[in-house]
Image (cartoon, helix red, strand yellow):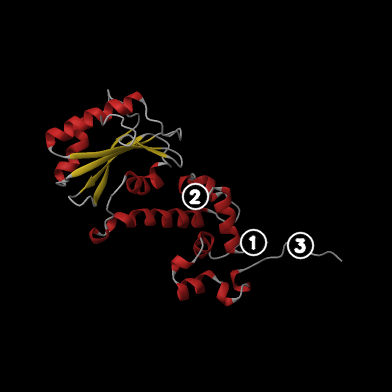
Amino acid sequence: MEVNSKPTYRISDLHESDRPRERLSSLGPQALTNAELLAILLRVGVQGENAVEVGQRLLTKFNGLGGLHRAPFKELMDQHGLGEAKAAQIKAAIELGRRLTLEAPQERPAINSPADAAALLQYEMSALEQEHLRVMLLDRRNRVLEVVEVYKGSVNSSQVRVGELFRDAIRANASAVIVAHNHPSGDPTPSPDDVAVTRAILQAGKLLDIDVLDHLVIGQGKWVSLKERGLGFT
């Protein structure tokens, strides 16, 4: 007798207390694993895998939520059990989570260390395929007012116009800024140009009475604070 070793599994096959939607309803979203949250977006699994197992497979393949965020849409869409609609749902959910951190003024995060700034920026910037330079605008309590993009492409001392970095800071009446750019290579080691740009930004900030708290270089899963390393801030 031939036995099917890989039967079809559905969320409804799970005990009610183990179903992601029921668990979210009774315990709250914070109690769910990443795979369970993905399962709610996916709704159904595929033959041999329920939605939770599909979610776990995706997390394993792409090395977590950060990898799903960085994955090209076409590659995500082509994964077994997804397709265009489910891939779009995953991308949209991750993007909504990113935007939430800056939406409500009363919930604006306060930056108390380079790690705080990196945590806010690294999620998105580590996924960028080109070099981007962004400026985090802060109020007097070091709460984030806004993050603005100033440059896209190669960031070097000959191309960066320092005045442009402070244009939005002046408009928003920001008291301080943190500058950040990414290295698409994944290696966040600061280059000589990064140090030169930092020195120019610091000088301009002093003239404008806007504190430049740091310059971060974002890599793949790593980041560097030029201030902590004494590069350009001495």
Left or right: where does residue 179 sit relative to residue 13?
A: left
Q: Amino acid at mark 3?
A: Ser
For the residues marked 3 and 1, what is the alpha-carbon distance in whole angstroms? 12 Å
Toward the viewer: 137 or 230? 230
Report, in whole angstroms, how far the alpha carbon at label 3 lies from the one at label 2.
Answer: 30 Å
Q: Amino acid at mark 1?
A: Glu
The image shows residue 91 at horizontal and vertical percentages of: 45, 53
Secondary structure beneath dot 1 equals loop
Of mark 3 and mark 1, the one earlier in the sequence is: 3
Query: Alpha-carbon neighbours of circle 3 within 10 Å: few (<14), some, or many (≥20)?
Result: few
Give the amino acid at mark 2. Leu
Identify the residue under disc 1: 49
Q: Residue at x 23, y 58 (%)?
A: 105
Can you identify the residue that label 3 sits on? 5
Which label sits on residue 68? 2
Quarter of the N terminus within the rendering: bottom right
Q: Earlier in the sequence, mark 3 or mark 2?
A: 3
SS for callout 2: helix
Secondary structure type for disc 3: loop
On the image, the x and y values in percent for residue 11 come to 59, 69
- Closer to the chain start, of discs 1 and 2, is 1
